[in-house]
Amino acid sequence: MGVRTWIDAWPVYRQLRSMDPLGRGAAAKSRTSSRLAARTGTADKVVKSVCPYCAVGCGQNVYVSGGRGGSGGTPPHREKVTQIEGDPDSPVSRGRLCPKGSASLQLTTGSAREYEVLYRRPHGTDWEPLALDQAMDMIADRVIEARRQGWRWESDGKRTRHTLGFASLGGATLDNEENYLIKKLFTALGAIQIENQARI
């Protein structure tokens, strides 16, 4: 690299030579940074969402690419989330996200995400894939059986009609509507041990 090339590449020289004396514009750009593009620039659409991690409810902009129909009768491409950022229109967070919210792209596209139900049998050492319908039936059967075994009609001579066979511990990632429905469901099943992580 010649001396002249080195001087031209020097940001201070570009800053003094150009109309950018504070070095906040073109003078601060390198060849590499001038070729960079925003991660959100390739998105085909932006979907409004809410961060799933806590009960604050910060707004998110989910940038999605793909999903357009193919040409000549070919099937449409699958949509893919390419970036998740804070929603500046959200009155809750005004475009800001905490470190977990900023990393929520990993929740959707991370390599550690499981896409099938895994089940480990009692005393088993390995996980095995299970059909979703079978897993839901197993859960329903166990809830019914636990309710039946833990049901108490009376306690100390008073009519109670509740079960101690299971309990509910809700998470702060659930919104108000989901918590309301879970409370109604477990109360209807006779559970009295209903709690939420946000209150503990």
Image (cartoon, rainbow, N blue to C red):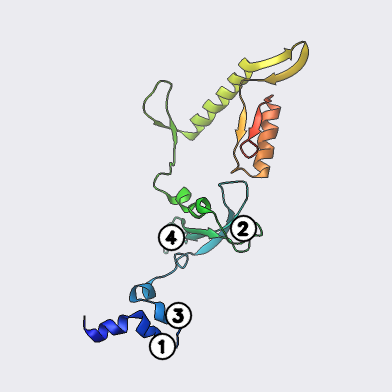
Q: Position of residue 23 (x, y in %)?
A: 44, 80
Name the quarter where the C terminus is drawn: top right
Mark 2 and mark 4 lie on one chain; the one further toward the N terminus is 4
Q: Is residue 36 above or below residue 84?
A: below
Q: Amino acid at mark 3?
A: Gly
Res 18 label: 1
Mark 3 and mark 1 lie on one chain; the one further toward the N terminus is 1
Q: Are marks 2 and 3 in contact (CB under 8 Å)?
A: no
For discs 2 and 4, the disc positioned in front in the rendered view: 2
For image coordinates 68% across by 43% down, the residue present is: 177
Quadrant location of residue 191? top right
Secondary structure beneath disc 3?
loop
Q: Amino acid at mark 1?
A: Ser
Res 170 label: none
**In the foreground, 5 or 89:** 5
Mark 1 and mark 2 lie on one chain; the one further toward the N terminus is 1
Mark 1 and mark 4 lie on one chain; the one further toward the N terminus is 1
How crowded is the residue under tag 2: few (<14 C-alpha within 10 Å), some, or many (20+)? some
Secondary structure beneath disc 4?
loop
Residue highlighted by disc 3: 25
Residue highlighted by disc 4: 73
For discs 1 and 2, the disc positioned in front in the rendered view: 1
Mark 2 and mark 3 lie on one chain; the one further toward the N terminus is 3
Q: Are marks 3 and 1 in contact (CB under 8 Å)?
A: yes
Quadrant location of residue 125? top left
